Structure formats: C-alpha cells, structure tokens
Image (cartoon, grey):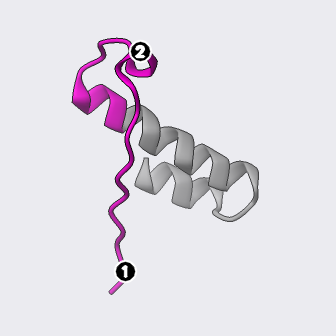
Amino acid sequence: MAKRFTLEFELPDDVVGGLPDAEVCALAREAFVMELLREHRVSQGKAAEVS
C-alpha cells in the first residue's frame, strides 16, 4: 500500500483573497502536483491520477 502524506501550511488572508477553504486546498494540491510534473518527479499519468 502506498504511503500517504498530509501537508499543512499557513497563508495570510490577503493571499487567499477570500476563496473558500476547499478551493484553496484544491489549488495548493494542483500547484504541488504540477511542480512535481515539471521537475519530472512524477509521470503525466500519475499527475492526472492524483489531481
């Protein structure tokens, strides 16, 4: 079974811009996965799978 990670970090309100929490989480997850893809740390298929 693959290991899973939970990330937690703080952002100031002016960065989040009043977005709903769920949208902020989705954007952060997408940005992280896209960076891993850009760095060739994951395949396109894996990026699509976890997005």
Q: Is residue 15 left or right of residue 1?
A: right
> What residue is pinned by disc 1?
3
What residue do we see at 54% from left, 48% from top? 32
Residue drawn at x 32%, y 62% is 6
**How would you classify the magenta stretch by its main secondary structure?**
loop
Residue 34, located in which quarter of the rendered image? top right
Q: Which residue occupies 37% across, 41% down?
A: 10
* Left or right relative to 48: residue 1: left
Q: What are the residue bounds of the magenta stretch?
A: 1-25
Is residue 19 within the magenta segment?
yes
Find residue 24 and report its horizontal and vertical position in percent: 35, 30
Q: Position of residue 43 (x, y in %)?
A: 65, 61
Which of disc 2 and disc 1 is earlier in sequence?
A: 1
Q: Is residue 30 magenta?
A: no
Kindly report the distance in space between the C-alpha atoms of the residues bearing marks 1 and 2.
Answer: 34 Å
Q: Residue at x 34, y 72 (%)?
A: 4
**Residue 37: horizontal and vertical position, in percent?**
67, 52
Identified by mark 2, the residue type is Asp
Task: Look at the picture and state if 7 lies above or below 31.
Answer: below
| Above or below for 30 versus 37 | above
Mark identifier at residue 14: 2
**Residue 3 position within the rendered picture, expressed as x and y whole percent measured from the top left:** 37, 80
Three-letter residue code for mark 1: Lys
- Position above or below: 43 against 26: below
